[in-house]
């Protein structure tokens, strides 16, 4: 049978040397052996071999090079007794499994013992950094001793001594071999046996990586230190955040949490009402609802019908009075996920919402039947593709309401120019609604409650409610019936004359209260969407215009009060009067006329008025100053005292700024500007015996507690004496009652009427355009009670004040006198002369 090839490592082990696995990385670093000192290996210093058996010497294994060999020789040199002692002290050592080349008999035992020890030493020397060539300095005597000891051990016991541990070998090496000048000194037996310090066993070397580089494993202690450092950092962050939340920011976080937990909803205060002098409601607030819808609830996925918006629009259109197609578009969701709110009708009456609610209940009961419930269950299981019968669908379930109180004006556009209006947010934006906004709106309350996910939590606690304080109510000086008549009269005349606009004011001459203030065209504050923007406002107070001949009354009052003339003073009136840079004429061309001062006023002569005004002072400058003083006393160029939003105070330049023509035009009513209430107040001053009482619109205020507080009495100022006022009233009777007067169309059967017509060019931004026709008067003339003014702006065709406003004055004054039960006085007319 063919023999297997011999293994060099196994043969080497059989010869006494331990097989060693090649270690390229460590063998390459091992130092090269040095040359022996003092002789050849295996001989004494003299070079002669030691006596002994050559056969035994041949069988003796060659000591390995490096640290293992040196350790083995050192151990042998100290003797077997010392080695046994070291083995006993270090403890038992596990027997080593015999090598594959173990034999029998003394040779096998000797070689096996030697081979086991030498192989272990060689293996350790190969892993360590053993020194090579230490055996070179060893003497032949040491070699012979080694050989004899090996044979002696083999013969005596037949078994190898117990292998020595690394610590014992190092201890033996420390006691045995001592270097001195390159030679090895063998320890003497006479030296005291002492145990050398045991060095720690080095860690087992790692096998190289497949690529040849050594694998380096991480150190556990370093990893633990990094892990504990990371955990400490994390816990430090948590602790810092905990301190911040519990101590530093606790108050702010608690307030924020409370703010998010509790919801505050405003409770709107009831806006105050506005009534006329008799308590009839002109403006009030009623409960109303905004009708809203959620279009996403009408989609096929939610309602389980294909035409949900169409069904809802068909049901709602008749109730809301809207177009069905437009309503369907409003109910169709543009984005099925986010389009969840749609306002479809604003501020609807409770009756409208009750109709919608009743319809919803009827459809809900129908959808709750057993058949419909079964269909809904199947549709829900089917998901988005599920469908139900149209009879089982309730599209009104997607319709909701929100309370939004509505400001209501029961009489529509009646006194709208005075009342004003409120905007969509319920804030007064015009007229008295704006002027008394703070009193009318009241103080809103609030309701605070706990909520979770948008739902109220009744048992959470901390709920409270602050009741709103309702607004105060206004009682005006207006008379609802007189206001209605005035509005009808001026609206009809403006439409008839195709005028731009007009206004009528009725005032109590004794108290200054405004009983009516009507404008045309008007507007309905209940329907601002269809109102004309130019009609929104109170032009009776905001429109500044040149008064024309109605202003001549103030010039005559100054002339009479200054004792310059009397009503019967003769005045020669030429057909033309040159003054400054102009030539003045009357409205009707005429030659030289012989008129009294009463006739100048009755026939409304511009030239006669200029001649009378020139006598107010010794110079024209002095006359201008006197006239200016009387104009301001009558309230021209100053606020009326109402404080109404948008009111104009007119235009009255200082007398020093009157130009050449202006100082002659101002006496007959051109070159200055007024509003309708200012000129009305002038005639009320004369009717009140020469005492001007500031006009008022608000009679009193009723507070939230129901207590009524009248407004303070208006200021009063005497402008002219009572005698002068009486003379002026008689002169004004000639304007209406005389056949030569310009205001005959204002006569009222049974009553004495005093008044004055006015016709003036209407000033614009770049000159004059159109006319202003007016008539102002009071009645009864001998015992005045009311003053009525009428102004029409830019009429088409006829433009004289007596012709356009005379009939309006008559209609309104006659109605007002009857409404207030003012009887005729029965006194005869004054019949002052007009000519001389």
Image: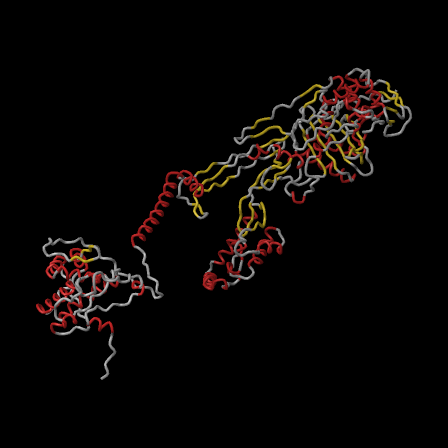
460, 33: nearer the viewer: 33
Give the image location of residue 627, x and y in percent.
Answer: 77, 20
Q: Residue 412 location, x and y as percent?
A: 65, 40
The single residue placed furthest to the front in the displayed view is 46
Q: Nearer the viewer, residue 340 or 172?
A: 172
- Quarter holding residue 637: top right
Question: Residue 61's x, y, as percent?
Answer: 18, 69
Residue 48 at least partly seen:
yes
Confirm whether residue 733 shows in the render. no
**Along the horizontal axis of the image, is 51 left or right of 393?**
left
- 440 relative to 25 in the view: left or right: right
Identify the image quadrant of the C terminus: top right
Q: Is 716 placed left or right of 356 in the picture? A: right
Q: Report the front residue among 98 and 307.
A: 98
Number of numbered discs: 0
Quadrant in the rendering for residue 90: bottom left
Residue extending farthest right: 591
Location of residue 307 by image quarter:
bottom right
- From the viewer's perspective, is residue 791 above or below residue 96? above
In this view, which residue lies farthest toward the left? 156
Find residue 833 and report its horizontal and vertical position in percent: 85, 21
The residue at the far bottom in this view is 1
Q: Nearer the viewer, residue 592 or 216?
A: 216
* Colouring scheme, one of rainbow, by chain, secondary structure, one colour: secondary structure
Which quadrant does the N terminus fall into?
Answer: bottom left
Indicate whether 631 appears above or below 27. Answer: above
- Residue drawn where x is 53% and y is 58% of the image: 299
């Amino acid at each position: 049978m063919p023999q297997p090839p011999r293994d060099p490592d196994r043969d080497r082990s059989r010869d006494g040397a331990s097989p060693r696995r090649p270690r390229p990385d460590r063998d390459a670093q091992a130092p090269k052996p040095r040359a022996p000192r003092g002789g050849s290996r295996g001989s004494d210093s003299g070079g002669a071999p030691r006596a002994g058996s050559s056969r035994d010497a041949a069988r003796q294994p060659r000591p390995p090079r490096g640290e293992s060999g040196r350790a083995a020789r050192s151990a042998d040199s100290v003797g077997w007794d010392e080695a046994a002692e070291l083995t006993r002290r270090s403890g038992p050592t596990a027997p080593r499994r015999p090598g594959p080349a173990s034999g029998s008999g003394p040779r096998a035992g000797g070689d096996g013992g030697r081979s086991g020890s030498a192989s272990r030493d060689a293996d350790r020397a190969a892993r360590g950094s053993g020194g090579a060539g230490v055996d070179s300095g060893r003497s032949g005597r040491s070699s012979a001793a080694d050989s004899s000891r090996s044979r002696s051990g083999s013969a005596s016991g037949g078994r190898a001594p117990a292998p020595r541990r690394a610590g014992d070998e190092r201890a033996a090496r420390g006691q045995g071999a001592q270097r001195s000048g390159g030679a090895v000194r063998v320890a003497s037996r006479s030296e005291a046996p002492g145990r050398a310090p045991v060095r720690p066993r080095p860690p087992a070397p790692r096998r190289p990586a497949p690529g040849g580089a050594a694998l380096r494993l991480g150190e556990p202690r370093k990893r633990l230190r990094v892990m504990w450092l990371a955990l400490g950092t994390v816990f430090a962050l948590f602790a810092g955040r905990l301190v911040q939340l519990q101590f530093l920011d606790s108050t702010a976080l608690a307030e924020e949490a409370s703010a998010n937990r509790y919801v505050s909803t405003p409770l709107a205060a009831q806006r105050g009402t506005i009534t006329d002098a008799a308590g009839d409601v002109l403006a009030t607030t009623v409960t109303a609802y905004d009708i809203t819808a959620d279009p996403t609830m009408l989609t096929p996925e939610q309602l389980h019908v294909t035409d949900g918006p169409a069904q809802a629009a068909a049901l709602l259109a008749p109730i809301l009075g809207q177009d069905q197609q437009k309503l369907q578009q409003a109910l169709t969701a543009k984005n099925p996920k986010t389009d969840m709110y749609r306002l479809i009708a604003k501020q609807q009456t409770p009756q409208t919402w009750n109709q919608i609610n009743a319809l919803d209940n009827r459809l809900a009961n129908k959808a709750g039947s057993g058949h419909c419930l079964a269909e809904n269950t199947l549709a829900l299981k089917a998901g988005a593709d599920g469908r139900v019968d149209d009879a089982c669908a309730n599209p009104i379930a997607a319709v909701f309401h929100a309370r939004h109180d509505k400001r209501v004006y029961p009489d529509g556009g009646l006194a709208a120019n005075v009342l004003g209006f409120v905007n969509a947010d319920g804030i007064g934006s015009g007229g008295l609604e704006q002027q008394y906004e703070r009193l009318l709106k009241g103080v809103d309350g609030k309701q605070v409650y706990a909520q979770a996910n948008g739902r109220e939590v009744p048992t959470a606690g901390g709920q409270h409610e602050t009741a709103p304080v309702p607004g105060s109510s206004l009682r005006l000086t207006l008379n609802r019936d007189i206001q209605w008549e005035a509005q009808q009269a001026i609206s009809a005349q403006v439409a008839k004359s195709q005028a731009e606009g007009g206004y009528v004011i009725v005032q109590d001459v004794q108290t200054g209260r405004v009983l009516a203030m009507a404008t045309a065209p008007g507007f309905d504050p209940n329907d601002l969407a269809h109102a004309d923007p130019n009609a929104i406002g109170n032009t009776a107070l905001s429109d500044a215009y040149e008064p024309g001949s109605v202003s001549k009354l103030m010039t005559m009052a100054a002339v009479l009060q200054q004792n310059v003339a009397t009503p019967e003073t003769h005045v020669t009136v030429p057909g033309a009067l040159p003054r400054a840079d102009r030539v003045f004429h009357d409205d009707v061309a005429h030659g030289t006329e012989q008129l009294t001062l009463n006739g100048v006023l009755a026939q409304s002569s511009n030239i006669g008025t200029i001649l009378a005004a020139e006598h107010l002072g010794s110079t024209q400058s002095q006359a201008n100053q006197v006239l200016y003083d009387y104009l301001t006393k009558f309230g021209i160029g100053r606020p009326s005292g109402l404080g109404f939003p948008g009111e104009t105070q007119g235009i009255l330049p200082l007398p020093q700024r009157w130009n050449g023509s202006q100082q002659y035009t101002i006496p007959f009513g051109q070159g200055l500007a007024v509003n309708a209430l200012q000129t009305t107040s002038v005639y009320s001053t004369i009717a009140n015996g020469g005492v001007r009482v500031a006009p008022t619109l608000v009679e009193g205020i009723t507070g939230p507690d129901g207590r009524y507080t009248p407004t303070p009495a208006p200021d009063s100022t005497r402008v002219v004496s009572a005698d002068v006022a009486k003379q002026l009233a008689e002169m004004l009777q000639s304007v209406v009652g005389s056949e030569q007067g310009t205001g005959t169309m204002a006569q009222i059967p049974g009553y004495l009427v005093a008044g004055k017509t006015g016709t003036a060019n209407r000033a614009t931004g770049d000159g004059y355009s159109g006319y202003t026709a007016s008539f102002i008067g009071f009645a009864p003339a001998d015992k005045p009670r009311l003053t009525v003014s009428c102004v029409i702006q830019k009429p088409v065709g006829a433009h004289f004040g007596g012709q356009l406003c005379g009939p309006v004055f008559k209609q309104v004054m006659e109605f007002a006198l009857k409404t207030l039960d003012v009887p005729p006085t029965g006194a005869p007319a004054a019949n002052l002369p007009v000519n001389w």
